[in-house]
Image (tube, rainbow, N blue to C red):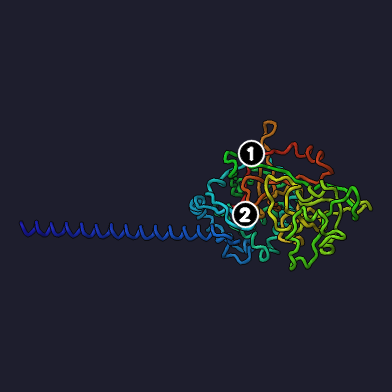
Amino acid sequence: MNILSSQKFRFTVGCAALLFVSLASSHLYTQSKNKQLVQQNQSFTQQENSAPVPSQISLTSNFQNPFVAQQISDEIIDKQNAFLPQQNLLAASAPYPVVDEFKKYKFSINGSQVVSPGKLPSSKVNFNQGDLLTVLVNTRKYFQDYSSEDPDILRTGMLATQGVTIPDVLNTLNFMIAVLKEDIANNRATRLQDPNFINTNFRVIKWSPYNPKNKQQKQLRITKYAVFTHPGSREKTSTFNTPIYSLKDNANNDKFYTKYTKQDVLSGIYEPGGKEFGKVTSLAYLTRNGLEEAIMEGTILINFKDGYKAFFNVDRNNGMSYIRGLKATAQKRYWYFREVDAIKGYGYKIDAKISIKPGVTFAGDVLNIGLGKVVVIEHTQGGRKHLRMGVIADTGGAFLPNLYQLDFLAGVFNNKKEFGQNVSQLPDYATAYFLVKK
């Protein structure tokens, strides 16, 4: 009886010891894994928050050619999609480092602050089919032609927190182009205007604005821009006395123009007798108001006295920052122009800029939101919900950084009054959604 009791005692002690060792081992393993995950997360955050921030986001680092999206098989895409809910849950809580136009870190936000799953309401989506197709095709071509020269377009921006990659962006462009071409060829209203078709075939991601200066802003601010038609002259006159200039090819090596403010340029440094005369080419002379509108809108349509008319688009600036809130005439930033064959949007150089169309183009923060993102804005008018679709295919100094605003290209107008009448039916604030092909 004593021997049996002793054996039971030893057996019980042995089991307890094994259980203790097992629990201790499990605890140590969990601590080790947690520590490893924390270190990985800290390493990622430190890399992302360092200045300057690398242009290529880690989510796209495996794609040397971003157009590889077209080569991904349906089977692989299906397997990837099976993991999206878990990926998105983890990514949404990750911090996104917002950068300025020089790609320097400004601040961080959590993905859930700005983007979350959504759904379009049951209203027809408004846009011109042919114009949208043109902008989609031109934007996709920019990715094809210039991804190596312009690595900024490989940034997925804040949508990376929803698991969106550059291949996803290209798949979205490809699918929309295919649908539009098929629907236009069959002479029918495109399926992309049907919210049910969109909700079925796309991830709809709601964009909640983040405005550091107004954290109560609940909807995206929708500003409007345009191309204005202005009379102009090849020679300086008493009326047309404000020049627009073009940089010569050697300006790529000689950065002399970065020394001069707008005020310096308009003081006559490039005119006969000026200290930099001959270093730039005079394109036209406008009124001062014409120059400010051309700089603000990015493109101007000039009607010359001899009957010739042409678009002129901003090419390069003097490298001085745009100061938000400062009146236009006091800004130090000055833009040099080039003659172009169409309204131009985003591009790393003038010869590469995307040709865009009014009514289907948004200008936005390309570094933090991303080029080629398809956006639907929703607003209520007359008791009915209205939806409008466009592509982020343009940018500007006011959008770097800017997670609370888009600028809508409204059209070509003769004057501000005509422009105001046209945009009076458009919202100043709207609910915004990104569309990403499932």
Is residue 48 left or right of 277 when viewed as pictured? left
**For residue 313, which quarter of the picture?**
bottom right
Task: Give how far across and how far down residue 2 sits, in percent.
Answer: 5, 57
Question: Looking at this rendering, what residue extends furthest in the right direction?
Answer: 306
Q: Which residue is mark 2?
A: 100
Precedes in sequence: disc 1 or disc 2: 2
**For residue 13, which quarter of the picture?**
bottom left
Question: Looking at this rendering, what residue extends furthest in the left direction?
Answer: 1
Quadrant of the image containing the N terminus: bottom left
**For residue 25, which quarter of the picture?**
bottom left
Q: How crowded is the residue under tag 1: few (<14 C-alpha within 10 Å), some, or many (20+)?
A: few
Q: How many marks?
A: 2
Task: Give how far across and how far down residue 174 sits, in percent.
Answer: 67, 57
At x 20%, y 57%, the residue is 16
Task: Give how far across and how far down residue 100 sits, in percent.
Answer: 62, 54
| 18, 228: nearer the viewer | 228
Amino acid on which the number 2 mark rests in the picture: Asp
Task: Give how far across and how far down residue 146 sits, in percent.
Answer: 69, 63
Q: Which residue is mark 1?
A: 122
Which structural element holds mark 2? loop
Q: Is residue 63 visible?
A: yes
At x 81%, y 60%, the residue is 246
What's the distance in space between the residues labelled 1 and 2, CA to CA? 37 Å
Q: How crowded is the residue under tag 2: few (<14 C-alpha within 10 Å), some, or many (20+)?
A: some
